[in-house]
Amino acid sequence: MSTFQAPKGTYDLLPPDSATYLAVREAIAAPLRGAGYGYIETPGFENVELFARGVGESTDIVTKEMYAFETKGGDRLALRPEGTASVLRAALEANLHKAGNLPVKLWYSGSYYRYERPQKGRYRHFSQVGAEAIGAEDPALDAELIILADQAYRSLGLRNFRILLNSLGDRECRPVYRAALQDFLRGLDLDEETLRRAEINPLRVLDDKREAVQKQLTGAPLLRDYLCDACKAYHEEVRELIGAAGVAFEDDTKLVRGLDYYTRTTFEFVHDGLGAQSAVGGGGRYDGLSEMIGGPELPSVGWALGVDRTVLALEAEGVELALPATTSVYAVPLGEEARRVLFAKVTELRKVGVSTDFCFGSKGMKAAMKSANRSGARYALLLGERDLAENVVQLKDMESGEQTALGLDEVVAELESRLG
Ligand code: HAM
């Protein structure tokens, strides 16, 4: 072990487990690519003000969890705690919304940073794949995103996840509800911090995990009863479309998300095998965010799925992804001249698309064959002095153990046709 360890709340992705992470990212991205979402990448840090305004001054993410710092040049930056504000900032900056093709549909994959108390499933550096559809108010768009996430999870073989769905209302009806909820909360016996939260962000109090608080909340006014007709109709249509697609969901009138930009449709994907950190993904509509960060009115909707927690969910369900071995051919030279000749063949094989590895260093035959086995390769190529003299190479089928001699000049074409 070296003197250094990964920082608290972080971990390294190492082979062979790292292959699962890549496969999860790929599985989430595939349905998005197939639905017209284009790939976007934004910087790992942004002006801190973007998140303060976008995610919300009163959220835990901004007040407690942001890695904010001042650069030597005096800029106030923060490592990105989430992707939505950055993606919208980038879309606005590049005027993607003015190209006359709304919604702008984007997907992304990357690292995010939150200074949280680490525990299983909760890290300070984690990974999301996300999607944002910018500039359209259409229940079918909300439904599309939920259906695509469901498809992604199912393609991975996940079954024990649930979709929680709610509507948070809009700028018409939410303030009325907010006031009613505040009135209710003021009459409760709450600690000072919670009372303060009730003044700044009363909806978040509904999300309080403490049982004593939850008990007092029975009888609290429900947002459902305050939705305006437009929000009600919109939500009904979203529910209708998801249901028609055969995607099961649960109405959760108490679902509040930890970010302030949400309006109308909000949802969370929870997995029942994960304990406290059960949200494997979440998202919703954020019709006001663009204006909050200085842009025009651009109603939008999106989600982000947590890669780390999705991998944990796979483990919890005992799902093993069928990941094909990355190496098809493993080449073992015996002797100096054989080394040179075989190394050249390895390069040729790779050029024609056959994934090939080579036995590096000076290993004996036994150790070399052990490495060939470990590589998962379908075939081993063995080249010794006598083979060289006869201009052949031995092709060993690693499954059957069968070995055949092939002309050195034919081997690339032969393996290409068998594996390419
Ligand atoms: P979020 O719910 O904060 O939403 O994060 C989405 C997912 O990221 C969570 O469900 C979880 O799986 C994962 N995640 C969050 N924090 C951590 C952590 N500390 N450790 C491990 N995984 C974590 C957003 O970030 C919104 N930007 C989603 C969105 C996109 N809304 C609209 N568009």
Image (cartoon, grey):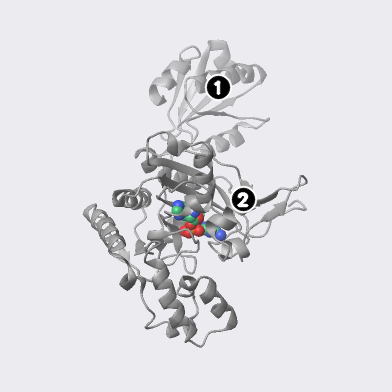
**Residue 15 in view, yes or no:** yes
**Residue 312 in view, yes or no:** no
Instruction: Choose the circle earlier in sequence order: 2 or 1.
Output: 2
The crowding category of the residue bearing disc 1, from other C-alpha atoms within 10 Å (few below 14, some 14 to 19, many at least 20), is many
Along the viewing direction, whichever of 337 and 292 lies nearer the viewer: 292
Q: Residue at x 43, y 75 (%)?
A: 179
The crowding category of the residue bearing disc 2, from other C-alpha atoms within 10 Å (few below 14, some 14 to 19, many at least 20), is few
Which structural element holds mark 1?
Answer: helix
Q: Position of residue 106 (x, y in %)?
A: 44, 41
Which structural element holds mark 2?
Answer: loop
Whether residue 76 sits left or right of residue 138 in the image: it is right
Along the viewing direction, whichever of 269 and 322 lies nearer the viewer: 269
Q: Residue at x 43, y 21 (%)?
A: 416
Which quadrant of the figure has residue 15? top right
Estimate the spatial distance between the alpha carbons at disc 2 and disc 1, rounded to whole Å.
31 Å
Whether residue 299 sits left or right of residue 307 in the image: it is left
Along the viewing direction, whichever of 289 and 82 lies nearer the viewer: 289
- Amino acid tagged 2: Asp
Whether residue 348 sits left or right of residue 117 in the image: it is left
Q: Position of residue 214 (x, y in %)?
A: 44, 81
Along the viewing direction, whichever of 286 and 327 lies nearer the viewer: 286
Q: What's the mark number on residue 164?
A: none
Which quadrant of the figure has residue 35? top left
Asked if the residues shown at circle 2 and circle 1 are in contact, with their CB atoms under 8 angstroms apart, the answer is no
Q: Dividing the image into 4 quarters, which one contains the C terminus?
A: top left
Tag 2 residue: 12
Tag 1 residue: 346
